[in-house]
Image (spheres, rainbow, N blue to C red):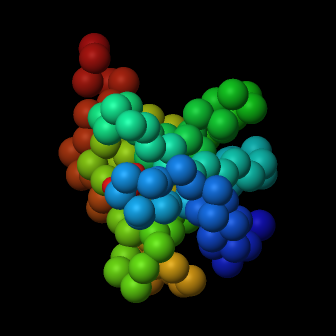
């Protein structure tokens, strides 16, 4: 599945976001190294900090599905402005991503910029730092 197919999936799942507080629906679609596709949307909560991001939702689905290696991920927001992964999501993606995988960020209908994992979270903290 190409990044354009992932874009389509991310846009589709964004329509199921539960974002009544921010009114900022986000969709994420990822392909794993094993070739599977997982999607997620943001799920907000009346207790605001309990909401979860679209990327976290897609990652939870991935791990639940038995996969742990992200090959590529697309994240899209609702407006004209690019929706880049927040800091917490960069760390969450990093747990399951090699430094050179591509993270594509987009707006309501297209990918606007692509990044490597390493460029989004340089010198990141990971399992090796626990040693
Ligand atoms: N959001 C995401 O789902 N992913 C991000 O990387 C950025 C922010 C969500 C969280 C919240 O529900 C809404 O966008 C506004 O911040």
Residue projecting furthest to the left: 123
Q: Is residue 59 above or below residue 117?
A: above
Check the picture and name the quadrant holding the C terminus: top left
**Left or right for 6, reference 1:** left
Write down the quadrant of residue 50 in the picture.
Answer: top left
In front here: 63 or 100? 63
Q: Position of residue 48 (x, y in %)?
A: 32, 38
From the viewer's perspective, tell me whether residue 89 is left or right of residue 29: left
Q: In the depicted view, which residue is nearer to us: 52 or 1?
A: 52
Residue 35, x across and y down, in percent: 77, 51
Residue 32 image offset from top left, x and y in percent? 68, 48
Tell me if residue 12 comes above or below residue 35 in the rendering: below
Residue 121 appears in the picture as rendered: yes
Location of residue 48 with respect to 87 vertically, above or below: above
Quadrant including the N terminus: bottom right
x 42%, y 79%: residue: 79
Q: Is residue 50 above or below residue 27?
A: above
Image quadrant where residue 5 sits: bottom right
The number of callouts visible is 0
Judge from the rendering whether residue 79 lies leftward or rightward of residue 13; answer left or right.
left
Q: Is residue 36 left or right of residue 56?
A: right
Which residue is pictured at 35% across the width and 80% down the height? Answer: 81
Q: Residue at x 66, y 37 (%)?
A: 61
Q: Nearer the viewer, residue 121 or 107?
A: 107
Evaluate whether residue 6 shows in this view.
no
From the top left corner, tell me how far across and down residue 100 is, in percent: 45, 57
Q: Quadrant of ligand 1?
A: bottom left
Q: Residue at image x 48%, y 62%? A: 25
């Amino acid at each position: 599945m190409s990044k354009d197919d992932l874009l389509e999936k991310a846009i589709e799942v964004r329509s199921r976001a539960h974002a009544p507080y921010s009114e900022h629906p986000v969709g994420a679609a990822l392909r794993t190294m094993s070739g599977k596709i997982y999607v997620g949307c943001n799920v907000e909560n009346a207790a605001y900090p309990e909401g979860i991001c679209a990327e976290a939702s897609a990652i939870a689905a991935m791990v639940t599905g038995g996969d742990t290696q992200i090959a590529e991920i697309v994240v899209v927001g609702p407006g004209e402005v690019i929706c880049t992964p927040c800091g917490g999501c960069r760390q969450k993606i990093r747990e399951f991503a090699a430094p050179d995988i591509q993270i594509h960020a987009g707006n309501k209908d297209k990918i606007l910029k692509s990044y490597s994992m390493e460029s989004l979270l340089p010198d990141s903290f990971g399992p090796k730092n626990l040693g």
